[in-house]
Image: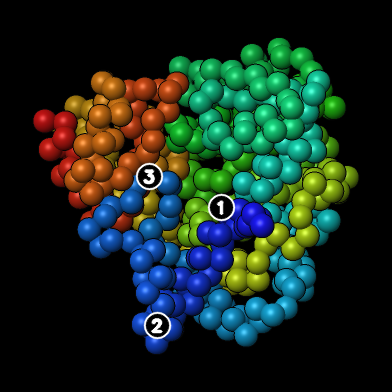
Amino acid sequence: MKSSLSRRGFAKVLSAGAAYAALNPSFAMSAPALRLVSSSPTLVRLNSNENPYGPSPMAVKAMTDAFSLAWRYPDEHEGMLVDALAKLNGVSSDQILLGSGSSEILKVAAAALTGPGKKLLVGHPTFEAILAYAAVAGAEIVKTNLTSDYAHDLPKMLAEKNAGLIYICNPNNPTASITPKAELRAFLAKVPPQTIVLVDEAYHHYVDSNDYESVIPLIAQYPNLMVARTFSKIYSMAGLRCGYCVARPELIQRLRAQQAWDSVNIMALVAAIASLQDAGQVEQGHRRNTEVKNFVYSELDKSGYKYIPSHANFMMIDLRREVRPVIDAMSGRNVQVGRVFPAMPNFMRVTVGTRPQMEAFVSAFHAVMS
Protein backbone atom coordinates (compact mmCIF):
# COMPACT_ATOMS: atom_id res chain seq x y z
CA MET A 1 0.00 0.00 0.00
CA LYS A 2 1.38 3.37 -1.00
CA SER A 3 2.07 5.72 1.91
CA SER A 4 -0.18 8.79 2.09
CA LEU A 5 2.30 10.80 4.19
CA SER A 6 3.24 13.92 2.22
CA ARG A 7 6.66 15.52 2.17
CA ARG A 8 5.38 18.40 4.30
CA GLY A 9 3.61 15.97 6.61
CA PHE A 10 6.82 14.00 7.04
CA ALA A 11 8.69 17.21 7.83
CA LYS A 12 6.07 18.07 10.44
CA VAL A 13 6.49 14.71 12.18
CA LEU A 14 10.26 14.88 11.91
CA SER A 15 10.51 18.44 13.23
CA ALA A 16 8.37 17.61 16.24
CA GLY A 17 10.56 14.61 17.03
CA ALA A 18 13.73 16.61 16.59
CA ALA A 19 12.40 19.30 18.92
CA TYR A 20 11.65 16.69 21.56
CA ALA A 21 15.14 15.26 21.17
CA ALA A 22 16.68 18.69 21.60
CA LEU A 23 14.73 19.25 24.78
CA ASN A 24 15.37 15.74 26.12
CA PRO A 25 19.03 14.69 25.68
CA SER A 26 18.45 11.18 27.00
CA PHE A 27 15.93 10.60 24.21
CA ALA A 28 18.32 11.99 21.61
CA MET A 29 21.06 9.59 22.71
CA SER A 30 18.78 6.68 21.88
CA ALA A 31 17.60 8.11 18.55
CA PRO A 32 20.46 8.12 16.03
CA ALA A 33 18.05 8.72 13.14
CA LEU A 34 17.14 12.09 14.61
CA ARG A 35 20.77 13.02 15.13
CA LEU A 36 21.35 12.48 11.41
CA VAL A 37 18.97 15.30 10.46
CA SER A 38 20.69 17.94 12.58
CA SER A 39 22.60 20.59 10.66
CA SER A 40 26.34 20.20 10.24
CA PRO A 41 28.18 22.73 12.42
CA THR A 42 30.29 23.72 9.41
CA LEU A 43 27.36 24.20 7.02
CA VAL A 44 25.98 27.74 6.67
CA ARG A 45 22.32 27.63 5.56
CA LEU A 46 21.40 30.83 3.75
CA ASN A 47 19.08 29.36 1.13
CA SER A 48 15.54 29.29 2.54
CA ASN A 49 14.93 32.64 4.26
CA GLU A 50 14.91 30.96 7.66
CA ASN A 51 15.34 32.86 10.92
CA PRO A 52 18.50 31.38 12.51
CA TYR A 53 17.90 32.72 16.01
CA GLY A 54 15.23 30.18 16.87
CA PRO A 55 11.80 30.47 18.48
CA SER A 56 11.07 32.45 21.61
CA PRO A 57 12.15 30.67 24.83
CA MET A 58 8.51 30.99 25.84
CA ALA A 59 7.53 29.03 22.73
CA VAL A 60 10.08 26.30 23.49
CA LYS A 61 8.75 25.96 27.05
CA ALA A 62 5.17 25.86 25.76
CA MET A 63 6.08 23.01 23.42
CA THR A 64 7.86 21.11 26.17
CA ASP A 65 4.80 21.39 28.39
CA ALA A 66 2.51 20.34 25.54
CA PHE A 67 4.09 16.97 24.82
CA SER A 68 1.73 15.44 27.37
CA LEU A 69 -1.18 16.79 25.27
CA ALA A 70 -0.13 15.10 22.05
CA TRP A 71 -2.94 12.57 22.39
CA ARG A 72 -5.57 15.31 22.07
CA TYR A 73 -6.97 16.98 18.96
CA PRO A 74 -5.88 20.62 18.70
CA ASP A 75 -9.34 22.26 18.61
CA GLU A 76 -9.12 24.02 21.96
CA HIS A 77 -5.72 25.51 21.20
CA GLU A 78 -6.86 26.50 17.71
CA GLY A 79 -9.55 28.63 19.33
CA MET A 80 -7.04 30.20 21.71
CA LEU A 81 -4.70 31.19 18.88
CA VAL A 82 -7.53 32.48 16.71
CA ASP A 83 -8.74 34.70 19.56
CA ALA A 84 -5.20 35.99 20.18
CA LEU A 85 -4.69 36.80 16.50
CA ALA A 86 -8.07 38.48 16.23
CA LYS A 87 -7.18 40.73 19.14
CA LEU A 88 -3.73 41.46 17.72
CA ASN A 89 -5.13 42.47 14.33
CA GLY A 90 -8.23 44.29 15.55
CA VAL A 91 -10.74 41.95 13.90
CA SER A 92 -13.32 39.40 15.03
CA SER A 93 -12.44 35.73 15.49
CA ASP A 94 -14.51 34.71 12.47
CA GLN A 95 -12.11 36.74 10.32
CA ILE A 96 -9.13 34.49 11.09
CA LEU A 97 -8.26 31.20 9.40
CA LEU A 98 -5.26 29.20 10.59
CA GLY A 99 -3.11 27.16 8.23
CA SER A 100 -0.18 24.78 8.24
CA GLY A 101 2.13 27.65 7.40
CA SER A 102 0.94 30.45 5.16
CA SER A 103 1.60 28.00 2.31
CA GLU A 104 -1.63 26.23 3.21
CA ILE A 105 -3.45 29.55 3.07
CA LEU A 106 -2.13 30.03 -0.46
CA LYS A 107 -3.18 26.50 -1.37
CA VAL A 108 -6.78 26.84 -0.18
CA ALA A 109 -7.03 30.28 -1.78
CA ALA A 110 -5.99 28.87 -5.14
CA ALA A 111 -8.45 25.99 -4.76
CA ALA A 112 -11.36 28.21 -3.74
CA LEU A 113 -10.77 31.25 -5.92
CA THR A 114 -9.12 30.10 -9.16
CA GLY A 115 -9.87 27.42 -11.72
CA PRO A 116 -10.98 27.14 -15.35
CA GLY A 117 -12.08 30.60 -16.41
CA LYS A 118 -10.68 32.20 -13.24
CA LYS A 119 -7.14 33.38 -13.73
CA LEU A 120 -4.40 33.76 -11.16
CA LEU A 121 -2.60 37.06 -11.65
CA VAL A 122 0.88 37.46 -10.12
CA GLY A 123 3.97 39.62 -10.28
CA HIS A 124 7.08 38.17 -11.91
CA PRO A 125 9.16 36.97 -10.27
CA THR A 126 7.40 36.18 -7.01
CA PHE A 127 6.92 33.35 -4.54
CA GLU A 128 6.09 30.35 -6.73
CA ALA A 129 3.97 28.14 -4.46
CA ILE A 130 0.62 29.66 -5.37
CA LEU A 131 1.40 29.26 -9.08
CA ALA A 132 1.71 25.51 -8.60
CA TYR A 133 -1.50 25.37 -6.57
CA ALA A 134 -3.46 27.34 -9.18
CA ALA A 135 -2.13 25.13 -11.97
CA VAL A 136 -3.58 22.10 -10.18
CA ALA A 137 -6.91 23.94 -10.01
CA GLY A 138 -6.82 24.38 -13.79
CA ALA A 139 -6.38 28.14 -13.74
CA GLU A 140 -4.61 30.21 -16.34
CA ILE A 141 -1.62 31.92 -14.72
CA VAL A 142 -0.80 35.43 -15.89
CA LYS A 143 2.57 36.89 -14.91
CA THR A 144 3.21 40.63 -14.91
CA ASN A 145 6.81 41.79 -14.76
CA LEU A 146 7.83 43.88 -11.77
CA THR A 147 8.64 47.54 -12.33
CA SER A 148 12.21 48.85 -12.62
CA ASP A 149 12.05 49.45 -8.85
CA TYR A 150 10.97 45.81 -8.31
CA ALA A 151 7.46 46.80 -7.19
CA HIS A 152 4.33 45.12 -8.52
CA ASP A 153 3.15 46.80 -11.71
CA LEU A 154 -0.37 47.41 -10.44
CA PRO A 155 -1.72 49.35 -13.48
CA LYS A 156 -0.83 46.43 -15.74
CA MET A 157 -2.44 44.04 -13.28
CA LEU A 158 -5.63 46.10 -13.32
CA ALA A 159 -5.76 45.88 -17.11
CA GLU A 160 -6.03 42.08 -17.00
CA LYS A 161 -9.63 40.78 -17.13
CA ASN A 162 -11.28 37.72 -15.55
CA ALA A 163 -8.87 37.29 -12.68
CA GLY A 164 -10.28 35.15 -9.92
CA LEU A 165 -7.34 35.90 -7.65
CA ILE A 166 -4.57 38.50 -7.65
CA TYR A 167 -1.54 37.59 -5.56
CA ILE A 168 0.70 40.36 -4.24
CA CYS A 169 3.68 39.34 -2.12
CA ASN A 170 4.65 42.44 -0.14
CA PRO A 171 7.54 42.46 0.68
CA ASN A 172 8.12 40.34 -2.38
CA ASN A 173 10.04 37.08 -2.52
CA PRO A 174 12.64 36.72 -4.09
CA THR A 175 13.38 40.43 -4.57
CA ALA A 176 12.87 41.59 -0.92
CA SER A 177 11.29 44.72 -2.40
CA ILE A 178 8.06 46.48 -1.45
CA THR A 179 5.12 47.88 -3.38
CA PRO A 180 4.45 51.40 -2.04
CA LYS A 181 1.42 51.83 0.20
CA ALA A 182 -0.16 54.65 -1.80
CA GLU A 183 -0.01 52.58 -5.00
CA LEU A 184 -1.51 49.58 -3.25
CA ARG A 185 -4.33 51.66 -1.75
CA ALA A 186 -5.18 53.14 -5.16
CA PHE A 187 -5.09 49.66 -6.69
CA LEU A 188 -7.47 48.16 -4.13
CA ALA A 189 -9.97 50.93 -4.78
CA LYS A 190 -10.13 49.94 -8.47
CA VAL A 191 -10.09 46.13 -8.37
CA PRO A 192 -13.46 44.65 -9.44
CA PRO A 193 -15.36 43.37 -6.38
CA GLN A 194 -15.60 39.84 -7.82
CA THR A 195 -11.79 39.56 -7.96
CA ILE A 196 -10.08 38.61 -4.70
CA VAL A 197 -6.77 40.21 -3.79
CA LEU A 198 -4.43 38.16 -1.60
CA VAL A 199 -1.60 40.18 -0.07
CA ASP A 200 1.11 37.94 1.37
CA GLU A 201 2.79 39.72 4.28
CA ALA A 202 5.13 36.92 5.36
CA TYR A 203 8.02 39.37 5.77
CA HIS A 204 5.98 42.25 7.17
CA HIS A 205 7.87 42.47 10.47
CA TYR A 206 11.22 43.15 8.80
CA VAL A 207 10.24 46.26 6.86
CA ASP A 208 11.92 49.60 7.60
CA SER A 209 10.15 52.05 5.33
CA ASN A 210 7.56 54.80 5.67
CA ASP A 211 6.42 53.82 2.18
CA TYR A 212 5.01 50.51 3.41
CA GLU A 213 2.00 49.50 5.46
CA SER A 214 0.09 46.34 6.26
CA VAL A 215 -3.25 46.27 4.46
CA ILE A 216 -5.03 44.34 7.22
CA PRO A 217 -6.88 47.50 8.37
CA LEU A 218 -8.24 47.91 4.82
CA ILE A 219 -10.14 44.61 5.03
CA ALA A 220 -12.93 46.54 6.77
CA GLN A 221 -13.26 48.60 3.58
CA TYR A 222 -12.74 45.89 0.94
CA PRO A 223 -14.65 42.57 1.17
CA ASN A 224 -12.47 41.17 -1.64
CA LEU A 225 -9.19 41.62 0.29
CA MET A 226 -7.38 38.96 2.31
CA VAL A 227 -3.98 38.98 3.98
CA ALA A 228 -1.70 36.02 4.70
CA ARG A 229 0.80 35.98 7.56
CA THR A 230 3.19 33.34 8.92
CA PHE A 231 5.02 32.38 12.09
CA SER A 232 7.90 31.01 9.99
CA LYS A 233 9.92 34.21 9.69
CA ILE A 234 10.16 36.70 12.57
CA TYR A 235 8.88 34.05 15.01
CA SER A 236 11.38 31.47 13.69
CA MET A 237 8.88 28.60 13.49
CA ALA A 238 9.45 27.45 9.89
CA GLY A 239 9.77 23.81 10.91
CA LEU A 240 6.56 23.86 12.93
CA ARG A 241 4.25 25.13 10.15
CA CYS A 242 1.82 27.73 11.37
CA GLY A 243 0.29 30.62 9.47
CA TYR A 244 -3.01 32.40 9.12
CA CYS A 245 -5.05 34.77 7.04
CA VAL A 246 -7.32 37.68 7.82
CA ALA A 247 -10.40 38.32 5.69
CA ARG A 248 -14.13 38.98 5.86
CA PRO A 249 -16.12 36.10 7.45
CA GLU A 250 -17.81 35.15 4.17
CA LEU A 251 -14.45 34.82 2.44
CA ILE A 252 -13.02 32.84 5.36
CA GLN A 253 -15.84 30.33 4.92
CA ARG A 254 -15.04 29.88 1.23
CA LEU A 255 -11.45 29.10 2.13
CA ARG A 256 -12.29 26.84 5.06
CA ALA A 257 -14.33 24.59 2.77
CA GLN A 258 -11.08 23.66 0.97
CA GLN A 259 -9.09 22.92 4.11
CA ALA A 260 -8.35 19.68 5.95
CA TRP A 261 -9.59 19.54 9.53
CA ASP A 262 -7.02 20.12 12.27
CA SER A 263 -4.24 20.94 9.81
CA VAL A 264 -2.18 22.79 12.43
CA ASN A 265 -0.60 20.54 15.04
CA ILE A 266 -0.75 21.22 18.75
CA MET A 267 2.98 21.97 19.09
CA ALA A 268 2.75 24.73 16.49
CA LEU A 269 -0.35 26.14 18.15
CA VAL A 270 1.08 26.41 21.65
CA ALA A 271 4.35 27.80 20.28
CA ALA A 272 2.48 30.45 18.30
CA ILE A 273 0.37 31.47 21.30
CA ALA A 274 3.45 31.79 23.47
CA SER A 275 5.35 33.70 20.77
CA LEU A 276 2.65 36.35 20.66
CA GLN A 277 3.07 36.80 24.40
CA ASP A 278 6.81 37.43 24.09
CA ALA A 279 7.01 41.17 23.51
CA GLY A 280 10.72 41.00 22.67
CA GLN A 281 10.58 38.39 19.90
CA VAL A 282 9.60 40.74 17.08
CA GLU A 283 11.71 43.70 18.22
CA GLN A 284 14.82 41.61 18.76
CA GLY A 285 14.43 39.71 15.50
CA HIS A 286 13.95 42.94 13.56
CA ARG A 287 16.95 44.61 15.19
CA ARG A 288 19.31 41.68 14.68
CA ASN A 289 18.28 41.32 11.04
CA THR A 290 18.82 45.02 10.34
CA GLU A 291 22.23 45.10 12.03
CA VAL A 292 23.57 42.07 10.18
CA LYS A 293 22.05 43.18 6.89
CA ASN A 294 23.83 46.52 7.18
CA PHE A 295 27.10 44.64 7.76
CA VAL A 296 26.60 42.70 4.52
CA TYR A 297 25.65 45.89 2.67
CA SER A 298 28.92 47.50 3.74
CA GLU A 299 30.96 44.51 2.57
CA LEU A 300 29.20 44.46 -0.80
CA ASP A 301 29.66 48.21 -1.19
CA LYS A 302 33.41 47.82 -0.61
CA SER A 303 33.54 45.19 -3.35
CA GLY A 304 31.43 47.17 -5.79
CA TYR A 305 28.52 44.73 -5.97
CA LYS A 306 25.02 46.14 -6.34
CA TYR A 307 21.99 44.72 -4.57
CA ILE A 308 18.28 45.36 -4.32
CA PRO A 309 17.53 47.25 -1.07
CA SER A 310 16.04 44.60 1.19
CA HIS A 311 12.89 44.88 3.28
CA ALA A 312 13.05 41.27 4.44
CA ASN A 313 15.44 38.75 6.01
CA PHE A 314 17.15 38.05 2.68
CA MET A 315 18.63 40.04 -0.18
CA MET A 316 19.24 39.80 -3.90
CA ILE A 317 22.78 40.53 -5.07
CA ASP A 318 23.61 41.37 -8.68
CA LEU A 319 26.61 39.19 -9.60
CA ARG A 320 26.87 40.61 -13.14
CA ARG A 321 27.26 37.04 -14.36
CA GLU A 322 25.38 33.75 -14.42
CA VAL A 323 24.47 32.72 -10.89
CA ARG A 324 24.38 28.90 -11.19
CA PRO A 325 28.17 28.34 -11.10
CA VAL A 326 28.46 30.72 -8.14
CA ILE A 327 25.78 28.84 -6.20
CA ASP A 328 27.66 25.59 -6.80
CA ALA A 329 30.99 27.12 -5.82
CA MET A 330 29.53 28.56 -2.63
CA SER A 331 28.09 25.17 -1.76
CA GLY A 332 31.56 23.69 -2.22
CA ARG A 333 32.67 26.05 0.54
CA ASN A 334 29.82 24.89 2.83
CA VAL A 335 27.71 27.98 2.28
CA GLN A 336 24.24 27.32 0.84
CA VAL A 337 22.56 30.23 -0.95
CA GLY A 338 19.27 30.53 -2.82
CA ARG A 339 18.33 28.73 -5.99
CA VAL A 340 18.36 30.12 -9.53
CA PHE A 341 15.45 32.43 -10.41
CA PRO A 342 15.11 32.28 -14.21
CA ALA A 343 13.65 35.79 -14.42
CA MET A 344 16.80 37.14 -12.71
CA PRO A 345 19.62 34.83 -13.86
CA ASN A 346 22.43 37.09 -12.63
CA PHE A 347 21.04 37.66 -9.13
CA MET A 348 21.83 35.55 -6.08
CA ARG A 349 19.35 35.38 -3.19
CA VAL A 350 20.99 35.16 0.22
CA THR A 351 19.27 34.79 3.58
CA VAL A 352 20.44 37.20 6.28
CA GLY A 353 21.80 34.86 8.94
CA THR A 354 23.68 35.58 12.15
CA ARG A 355 26.77 37.80 12.14
CA PRO A 356 29.15 34.77 12.20
CA GLN A 357 27.18 33.13 9.39
CA MET A 358 27.34 36.26 7.26
CA GLU A 359 31.05 36.67 7.95
CA ALA A 360 31.46 33.13 6.60
CA PHE A 361 29.32 34.08 3.62
CA VAL A 362 31.39 37.20 2.89
CA SER A 363 34.62 35.19 3.08
CA ALA A 364 33.34 32.50 0.74
CA PHE A 365 31.81 35.09 -1.60
CA HIS A 366 35.10 36.97 -1.97
CA ALA A 367 36.96 33.73 -2.63
CA VAL A 368 34.48 32.54 -5.24
CA MET A 369 34.12 35.88 -7.02
CA SER A 370 37.82 36.74 -7.10
Residue at x 30%, y 27% (from the top left corner): 323
As drawn, which residue projects farthest toward the right? 250
Q: Which residue is mark 2?
A: 30
Q: Which residue is mark 1?
A: 7
Residue at x 51%, y 26% (from the top left corner): 125
Mark 3 secondary-structure assignment:
loop
Residue 76 visible, this angle = yes
Q: Which residue is mark 3?
A: 47
Q: Which residue is at the front of the view, 281 or 351?
A: 351
Q: Do the residues bearing badges 1 and 2 touch, measured as CB atoms within 8 Å?
A: no
Alpha carbon distance from label 1 to label 3? 19 Å
**366 to 234, vertically: above or below:** above
Could you say where residue 345 lies in the image, as x and y percent from the top left? Answer: 36, 22
Packing grade of label 3 (10 A; few <14, some 14-19, many >=20) is some
Could you say where residue 346 lies in the image, as x and y percent from the top left? Answer: 32, 23
Packing grade of label 1 (10 A; few <14, some 14-19, many >=20) is few
Residue at x 42%, y 28% (from the top left corner): 341
Mark 1 secondary-structure assignment:
helix
Amino acid at circle 1: Arg
Packing grade of label 2 (10 A; few <14, some 14-19, many >=20) is few
Q: Nearer the viewer, mark 1 or mark 3?
A: 1
| Among numbered discs 1 and 3, the one appearing first in the sequence | 1
| Total marks in image | 3
Could you say where residue 24 lies in the image, as x and y percent from the top left? Answer: 43, 83
**281 to 100, vertically: above or below:** below
Could you say where residue 33 lies in the image, as x and y percent from the top left? Answer: 40, 70
